[in-house]
Image (spheres, helix red, strand yellow):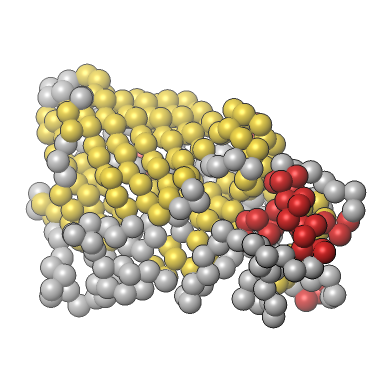
Amino acid sequence: MIIRQFLLLLLLLTNVYLHANDGAYFASGNQLIPIHETDISVQKEILKVKKVNNQFIEVTVYYEFFNPAEAKEILVGFEAVSPSGDVNGAPKKGLHPYMRDFTVEMNGENLKYNVAYVADSLYYQNGKIKSIDLKTFDGSTSGNYIDFMYVYHFKANFKKGKNIVKHTYKFDVSSSIDYNYHFNYVLTAANRWANKQIDDFTLIVEMEDSEEFNINKTFFKSKDEWQIEGKGKVSEIEGKANTAMEKDALRFQMQEGRLVFKRKNFHPEGELEIYSFNKHVQSMENKDDGFYLPFSVYMSKGFDLEKPTTPFQREIMSTLPFARRGYVFKDNKFNYKI
């Protein structure tokens, strides 16, 4: 088993948001999609996801589309699921409440967009998007769980040949008792374009310094497909049923820098899933007990980071910078197996 630092557990757990509903799932990312059939293909895509202050994700996407025929206008959309959990899911000023700064630039021109609320996947009917009326809709439109999703849509004029689209937005990082942060990005939506793939795909993942996180093996097979630009290391994690790690994944321990994934003729069969666990430390009293969450609601006594009260707590705080940088301590009281 891999030795992990107790101090790193402490650091990560101090950033978690504890919610009455066990978590807040704010949003997930999605590709731009054609609302109706088209012969336009995706020649190139550069997707960058960046986490900022452990609070939100910045998504920037660069596309090169190819239109083989004469210039034409098509309807393009961005599907965003509604938030759930410990959230207020009602729209804010007509928009998704936890997504902002949504922009689309096409061939150097900023495009205006509209937002529709849709209750099923068959929302495009008779040449129009069928949007529900929140005043008469029978489902839930506010509170913790919402019965509709958002479609940000716009008209895009594709000239003959190459067209360049730049797309940006931000959304809040989901979290729970289990996860320090968790977010998904729907890659398979790219298969809706004419070529059913992305001819030249680049994914850039930039978390923050001194972090450990996982990426599930949903659209790739091995760590050799990733490049670390900076300082860090990667290990293979085998998923096991009935555990927090149910899927095979890569675990990245990054001191600084970013990850890069490149693929030609990319036909995604799974979605991007990036997450960081709140460390479940195995009970030292009885290893058959399963797991508990240290420094959480399950502890009878808290740990005041600003005012450590015992010699051991003071030792933890003084050695915290070393743990963040991956140091394995000779004194095993600071090292836990998980």
Please state if 117 lies on the left or on the right of 88 as rendered: left
Residue 79 sits above or below residue 268 on the image = below
Q: Front-most of 33 and 192? A: 33
In the displayed orientation, state which residue is furthest to the bottom. 300
Residue 255 position (above or below residue 162):
below
Give the mark count: 0
**In the rendered image, which quarter is residue 191 located in?**
top left
Task: Say which of 292 and 201 sits in front.
Answer: 292
133 or 328, nearer to the observer: 328
Query: Which quadrant of the view contains residue 44?
Result: top left
Q: Determine the residue positioned at 16% across, 23% down.
A: 159
Residue 63: give x, y in percent of width and height. Answer: 32, 29
- Residue placed at 47% from the left, 34% from the top? 203
Image quadrant assignment for residue 62: top left
The residue shown at (26%, 68%) is: 90
In percent of width and height, residue 113 lies at 16, 45
Residue 273 can be seen in this image = no
List the single residue furthest toward the top. Answer: 161
Residue 3 place in picture, x, y as percent: 81, 51
Q: Which residue is found at the position 84% from the left and 70% from the top?
A: 284
Please determine whether, in this image, residue 46 is positioned above or below residue 269: above
